[in-house]
Image (tube, rainbow, N blue to C red):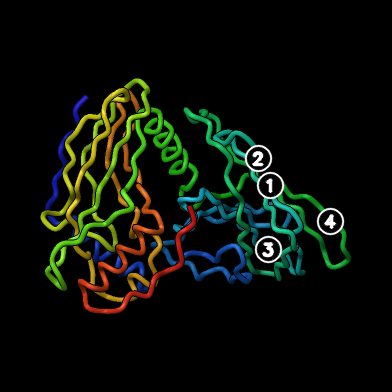
């Protein structure tokens, strides 16, 4: 099976503009410890599917970008009733995962009337291939002001389609891992100085000894890094599971030169590699940087652009 080469054109400029707008103007729903949030005012063009309402509770799921690598899902509980409630337990189940996922925070979580609380659950191992019947179930245990508890169970809304995306990512990762491990070397070589400097990343593909082959198409730019030449890093390689280790040098320059791109970084040091498993799935695998490489990349960008780096906290996972 041969990968078809993609048109490269203006992908870089358009992608960077879109991502820049997303960074400057949009944030995801509250994280694990966020205060209850009011529901946003809907618009005709962007309104997602409403939460499933069961016994006065709106149930839905979502995933914030910083949670991708750690496979954390946010279960959302909206208090559609007139009185405040307290969430004391939450359990998410789906046939695409090997076991249920429970909210494990020790303290309870109050939800005033009309507001939403997002609760993080750690997703268990994936079931691959994904079963055909994967209707999820969310069970919330709540207490009223008197302390009386009740359980509410229903199929949560998935307004952003996170479950199909996670299923595809999980099963692609599993198929790739059966053939080879993809990593970025901790050592970052930099040539040149100032605005003429170029960073040289090393992508390592270490076969696992399994059967099958990986067809490596290209690596793509991130919010922080772009190819020194062209709009992608062509790889154009076939790596058999029983073959030798392969290394690819990727010459990179900053994709943008504004300090807040580093201060707010979440996924800019994850390298997207487009690939295909022979007789299996295809897609994009994000290859993470170690903390050592991540900080070296921040320093490189700061030196190239002429500002002092203010590192973002290390992304989990």
* Residue 313 placement (x, y as % from top left): 46, 67
The residue singled out by tag 4 in the image is 149
Tell me which corner region of the image, top left, top right, bottom left or bottom right, holds residue 255: bottom left
Establish if 280 lies above or below 53.
above
Q: Are marks 2 and 1 in contact (CB under 8 Å)?
A: yes
Q: Earlier in the sequence, mark 4 or mark 2?
A: 2
The reply to whether dot 2 and dot 3 touch (C-beta < 8 Å) is: no
Percent coordinates x, y for residue 122 in the rendering: 59, 48
Residue identified by numbered label 3: 80
Q: Position of residue 25 (x, y in %)?
A: 37, 73
Q: Residue at x 55, y 66 (%)?
A: 30
Residue for badge 1 = 91
Task: Tell me the tag on residue 112.
Answer: none
Mark 4 and mark 1 lie on one chain; the one further toward the N terminus is 1
Spatial separation of the CA atoms under disc 4 and disc 2? 21 Å
| In the foreground, 145 or 208 | 208
Asked whether the residues under the numbered discs 3 and 1 touch, taking CB atoms below 8 Å apart as contact, a structural biologist would say no
Q: Tell me: 108 left or right of 315.
A: right
């Amino acid at each position: 099976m041969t990968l078809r080469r993609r048109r490269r054109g203006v992908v870089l400029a358009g992608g960077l503009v879109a991502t820049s707008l997303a960074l400057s103007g949009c944030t995801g729903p509250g994280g694990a410890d966020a205060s209850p949030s009011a529901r946003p005012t809907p618009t005709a063009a962007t309104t997602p599917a409403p939460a499933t309402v069961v016994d006065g509770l709106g149930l839905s799921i979502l995933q914030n970008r910083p949670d991708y690598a750690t496979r954390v899902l946010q279960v959302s509980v909206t208090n559609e009733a007139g009185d405040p409630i307290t969430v004391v337990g939450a359990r998410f189940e789906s046939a695409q995962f090997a076991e249920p996922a429970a909210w494990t925070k020790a303290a309870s979580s109050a939800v005033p009337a009309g507001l939403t609380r997002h609760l993080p659950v750690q997703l268990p191992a994936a079931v691959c291939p994904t079963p055909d019947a994967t209707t999820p179930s969310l069970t919330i245990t709540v207490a009223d002001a008197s302390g009386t508890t009740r359980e509410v169970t229903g199929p949560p809304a998935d307004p952003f389609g996170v479950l199909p995306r996670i299923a595809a990512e999980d099963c692609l990762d599993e198929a790739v891992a059966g053939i080879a491990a993809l990593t970025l070397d901790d050592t970052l070589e930099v040539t040149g100085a100032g605005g003429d400097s170029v960073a040289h990343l090393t992508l390592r593909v270490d076969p696992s000894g399994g059967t099958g082959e990986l067809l490596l198409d290209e690596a793509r730019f991130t919010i922080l890094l772009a190819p020194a030449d062209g709009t992608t890093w062509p790889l154009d390689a076939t790596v058999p599971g029983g073959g030798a280790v392969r290394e690819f040098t990727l010459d990179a320059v900053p994709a943008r030169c504004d300090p807040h791109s580093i201060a707010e970084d979440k996924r800019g040091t994850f390298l997207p590699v487009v690939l295909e498993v022979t007789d299996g799935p295809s897609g994009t695998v994000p290859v993470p940087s170690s903390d050592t490489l991540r900080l070296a990349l921040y320093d490189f960008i700061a030196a190239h652009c002429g500002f002092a780096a203010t590192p973002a906290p290390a992304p989990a996972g």
